[in-house]
Image (cartoon, rainbow, N blue to C red):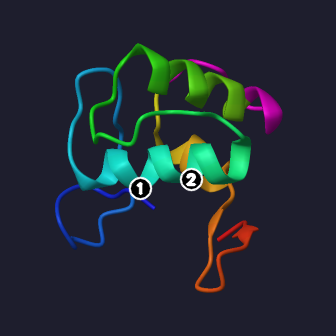
Amino acid sequence: MPTVGNETGDTNCQIGVGSTGPGVKALQNTLNDCYGTRLVVDGIYGNQTSSAVVHAQQANGITSDGIYGHQTRDHLVWHDDRGRCVRP
């Protein structure tokens, strides 16, 4: 799941429109595989990624603002090492 910086272990990440990088790619892959979206996995957090995050937030009954922050991180399901979508 995305965190601030590369391999920092900081779990208080917040990413939104305009963010780029491997954390965005990981989020886009999870949204595609675990929430049925069809995002282009390009590492760019644009309007389509924001809309997909809103969808996932709504599916999890949390504030739907399109921003990936600590609350969203704590509620999304992610791939485990077996490729299953599970809560961390």
Name the residue beneath numbered marker 1: 26
Look at the picture and state if 82 lies above or below 50. below
Residue displayed at 64% across by 71% down = 88
Most distant residue in the top direction: 47
Name the residue beneath numbered marker 2: 30
Q: Position of residue 18 (x, y in %)?
A: 23, 22
Helix, strand or loop at mark 2: helix
Q: Main secondary structure of the magenta part?
A: loop
Q: Residues within 10 Å of mark 2 (few under 14, many from 20)?
A: some
Helix, strand or loop at mark 1: helix
Residue displayed at 21% across by 47% down = 21
Locate residue 87 relative to residue 80 in the image: left or right. Answer: right
Look at the picture and state if 25 lies above or below 63. below
The boundaries of the magenta stretch are 58-66
Name the quadrant of the N terminus: bottom left
Q: Can the viewer see residue 61?
A: no
Residue displayed at 58% across by 33% down = 38
Name the amino acid, label 1. Ala
Look at the picture and state if 42 lies above or below 9. above
Query: In the picture, residue 35 is in which quadrant?
Result: top right
Report how far apart the C-alphas of labels 2 and 1 lie in the structure.
6 Å
**Number of numbered labels in the structure image:** 2
